[in-house]
Image (spheres, grey):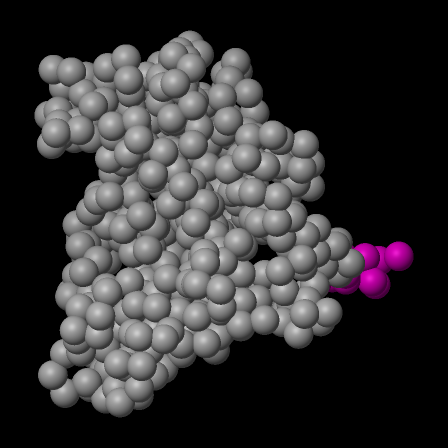
Amino acid sequence: MSFSDFSLPEGTHTVVLGVGDVNGFMRGKRIPARQWERTCRDGNAIIAALFAMDMTSDVWDTPYCSFDNGYVDMHMFPLHVPIASPWEPGVAICMARAEGLDHQPVPIDPRNVLLRQVERAAAMGFEVKVGTELEFYLLDPKTKKPTFNSNQVYGINRSAEMEHVLGPIREHLTALDIPIEQSNPEYAAGQVEVNIRYDEAMKAADRVVLFRAMVKEIATQHGYLATFMAKPFIAESGSGFHTHYSLWKDNKNQFAQDGKLNGTGRAFMAGLQLRMVEMSLATSTTPNAYRRRQPYTFCPMNASWGYDNRTVGLRVIEGPDSAVRIEKRDAAADCNPYYLLGCEIAAGLDGIEQKLEPGPVTDGNAYEDDPATPLPLTLDVAVELARNSDFMKEVYGTDRLAIVLKQADREIAFVQDQVTAVETERYLENF
């Protein structure tokens, strides 16, 4: 594509261009508008270790990026026409794709995991559509605590209290081509859920990367710290990342028959159920994320499924044919959307190809005596499952899986090597 395909909004002096890193958070550069034509033609150079860099920006040697090869560059190219920032005059915002210096895909780019599954679905005659729901906290940037008191989930008055920041989030993100369907206070003081309308899977994942970056930016402008950390407060609700799946062909939902989930939908769900435990590293990537998995918290504990049941891992939602879908509820809000959707779509397509059937439906409380396979409750268990999984090796690829396993091992060691404030308070004077 040429420069004319990515022309800048009138009055633009700076373009924000970025990609999703190994954790699916946006990193990139601010580029003067006078350099934009060259960027569209030649790309913008940036270190490829973005795809092997932890959340603190620490790096380690990998086969693709190392001190032996000088930590090589890659190039960013725009994915779409830059969109004017609604809150920063003269600035336009644009998601990028990565390309190696050899003009080939970067082998450790997480986005290519999802791209492969989208192409696989297309070869089967399907377009995958995904709706995403993300939860996050709005906190005081100094105290790191909520500024709102008490749990007022769905409270209209609490919504009005938060409107000075949630209103701009909804309006500005919609202006950035992230169609927001709704927002509401969630199940803890200061916690919020924002839902993005369903769309083609790659577009949905790209939007999540941009969404998280822009929510944090808008929140800062209004005096808040926005965090997608999975479990910032042990006694409060964790933040999840729910995904809603349907497959489409000829403008028809292939999961629906007379408003009910059909055989294709059941097979897709059976694939998800089969791999749900095994793919836990894609859904929850830090030790903290596994603190979400507690009974009676609306976070699933096992690979159960049910109809309109918020205690299960896979929730079937029926209604008009266009709305029939499968909601997967176990992911944490801070996981990588490319790895998450890539694994989930791969599992679902396997289910269709293998004509799988899901296990018994859960009609009641999935937290009590449910026969479904339990989900891992610690990161070390998820790491071992992924390390020994042919499915994860196939979906991620060897090098990408090695990077996320190494990051997980490092996080486990870091957390284990701490003496916590709780331990000091309980034991220092009493022993």
Asked which quadrant contains residue 200, the reply is top left
Relative to 163, say whether 191 is above or below.
Answer: above
Observer able to see residue 146: no
User: Does residue 426 show up magenta in the picture?
Assistant: yes
Residue 274's place in the image compared with 61, above or below, is: above
Percent from the top left, x then y, of residue 381? 67, 36
- Image check: 220 left or right of 423? left
Q: Residues in magenta?
A: 419-431
Q: Is 153 placed left or right of 411 in the picture?
A: left
Q: Which residue is drawn at 32% across and 55% down?
A: 206
Q: Which of 419 and 424 is in front in this view?
A: 419
Residue 398, how many percent across, how many down? 61, 44
Q: Residue at position x 17%, y 50% from top? A: 181
Q: Residue at x 57, y 49 (%)?
A: 400
Residue 92 inside the magenta-drawn segment? no
Where, quadrant-wise, is the N terminus in this rendering?
bottom left
Locate residue 383, reporting x and y percent: 66, 40
Q: In this view, does 260 lie to the left or right of 106?
A: left
Location of residue 125 with respect to 354 vertically, above or below = below
Query: Is residue 108 shown above or below 169?
Result: above
